[in-house]
Image (cartoon, rainbow, N blue to C red):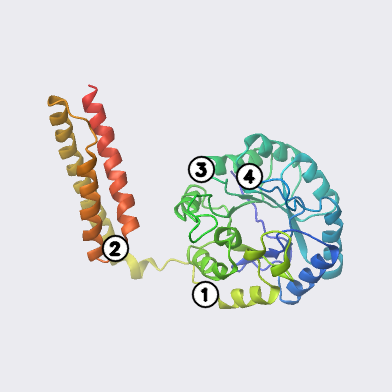
């Protein structure tokens, strides 16, 4: 994939690129009021949902094409660029007809290759920035596939939006960040601009600042934040929207660190990391060899591969050891589960030889 800048004329390339505005365009007055406050605070790109697919029918699902005229008015009266989500070919044609400057593909749409292909074909030959949100479930290949479909249609001003992944665990976040997935996306496609949507990840306005800071610390290019002139009375996702003034406070609070690598200062420490990684790999290989010997023993004695009691003992004792060493329990659990999965895989091979 080949990428051109997603930046629009007059947009400062410094981090973070900021896209802000209401979850949904509700009324002309609400859109104009929010836009004027954002413009006064220096925000250059307004976002507003025109079509709002909801998890269940019956809720507010957007004003539809009528709201595009309000976005056009925002451009005329404030000079801001305007953006919205598209999910169908008709959405694309309507948005282009009203001069929308930037489009994004939502998480539900990204998960549907048929819908993405339809959007790609509708945009063929159009020079417009298009951002692709991660799919609802943690599927990196599906995310990359959506970008490739748009790229194959000739679009080069592409970017990605990390909005988190659905989970039954709603204790902290609305959508789990799973930061390792967008990090892997950037490793695979280094030139792809990556933005964070802390509103949808957190689901609560109090989480927007820490999530935005983490995104900046992870070298994201920008942020897309839901901002409403009266968030408490928003018609959709009220709990995750902030006022324009609060958005300004959040942006002013962010610490934007240098992206350049001072490799000279880090060379000694990185050498230590390399040596430790070599030792880790050697230990893992040795552990797998022992695991294979155990697999041979189990085959000879007609034993099942998984011994639940033993596995439970390993998890409990090792996690306790790790916590005593000031390591995170969830981190160690993830490592131990991966090691166990690979041990089981190798032992199954031995039992079936």
Frontmost residue, 339 versus 311: 311
Q: Position of residue 10 (x, y in %)?
A: 73, 67
Element type at mark 1: loop
The span from disc 1 to disc 3 (Cα, nearest Å) is 31 Å
Q: Sequence order check: which comes first, mark 4 or mark 2?
A: 4
Q: Sequence order check: which comes first, mark 3 or mark 2?
A: 3
Q: Position of residue 173 (x, y in %)?
A: 51, 59
Residue wearing tag 4: 108
Q: In the image as oriented, which residue stretches furthest toward the top?
A: 353
Q: Position of residue 204 (x, y in %)?
A: 58, 65
- Tag nearer the camera, 1 or 4: 4
User: Which quadrant does the C terminus fall into?
Assistant: top left
Q: Sequence order check: which comes first, mark 2 or mark 1?
A: 1
Q: Position of residue 56 (x, y in %)?
A: 67, 46
Residue wearing tag 2: 327
Residue wearing tag 3: 139
Residue wearing tag 1: 255
- Tag nearer the camera, 1 or 3: 3
Q: Residue at x 82, y 60 (%)?
A: 71
> Is residue 281 placed above or below 83 in the rendered structure?
above
Q: Sequence order check: which comes first, mark 3 or mark 4?
A: 4
Few, some or many C-alpha atoms within 10 Å of disc 4 (few <14, some 14-19, many ≥20)?
Answer: some
Q: Quadrant of residue 122?
A: top right
Q: Are marks 1 and 4 in contact (CB under 8 Å)?
A: no
Element type at mark 2: loop
């Amino acid at each position: 994939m080949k990428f051109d800048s997603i930046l629009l004329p007059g947009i400062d390339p410094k981090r973070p690129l900021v896209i802000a505005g209401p979850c949904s365009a509700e009324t002309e007055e609400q859109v104009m009021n929010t836009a004027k406050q954002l413009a006064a605070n220096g925000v250059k790109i307004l976002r507003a949902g025109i079509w709002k697919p909801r998890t269940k029918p019956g809720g507010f699902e957007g004003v539809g094409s009528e709201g595009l005229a309000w976005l056009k008015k925002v451009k005329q009266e404030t000079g801001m660029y305007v953006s919205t989500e598209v999910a169908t070919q008709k959405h694309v044609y309507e948005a282009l007809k009203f001069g929308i400057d930037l489009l994004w593909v939502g998480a539900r749409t990204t998960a549907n290759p048929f819908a993405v292909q339809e959007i790609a074909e509708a945009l063929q030959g159009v020079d417009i920035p298009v951002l692709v949100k991660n799919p609802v479930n943690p599927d990196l290949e599906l995310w990359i596939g959506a970008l490739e479909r748009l790229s194959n249609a000739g679009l080069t001003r592409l970017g990605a939006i990390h909005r988190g992944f659905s989970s039954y665990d709603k204790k902290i976040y609305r959508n789990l960040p799973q930061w390792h997935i967008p990090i892997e996306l950037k490793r695979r496609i280094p030139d792809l601009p990556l933005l964070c949507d802390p509103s949808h990840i957190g689901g609560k306005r109090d989480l927007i600042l820490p999530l935005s800071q983490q995104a900046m610390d992870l070298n994201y290019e920008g942020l897309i934040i839901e901002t409403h002139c009266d968030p408490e009375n928003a018609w959709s996702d009220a709990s995750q929207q902030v006022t324009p003034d609060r958005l300004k406070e959040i942006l002013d609070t962010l610490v934007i660190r240098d992206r350049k690598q001072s490799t000279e200062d880090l060379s000694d420490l990185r050498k230590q990391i390399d040596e430790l990684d070599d030792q880790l790999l050697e230990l893992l290989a040795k552990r797998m060899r022992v695991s294979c010997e155990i697999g041979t023993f189990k085959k000879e004695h007609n034993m099942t591969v998984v011994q639940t009691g033993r596995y439970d003992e390993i998890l409990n004792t090792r996690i306790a050891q790790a916590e005593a060493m000031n390591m995170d329990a969830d981190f160690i659990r993830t490592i131990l589960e991966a090691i166990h999965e690979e041990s089981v895989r190798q032992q199954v091979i031995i039992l079936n030889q």
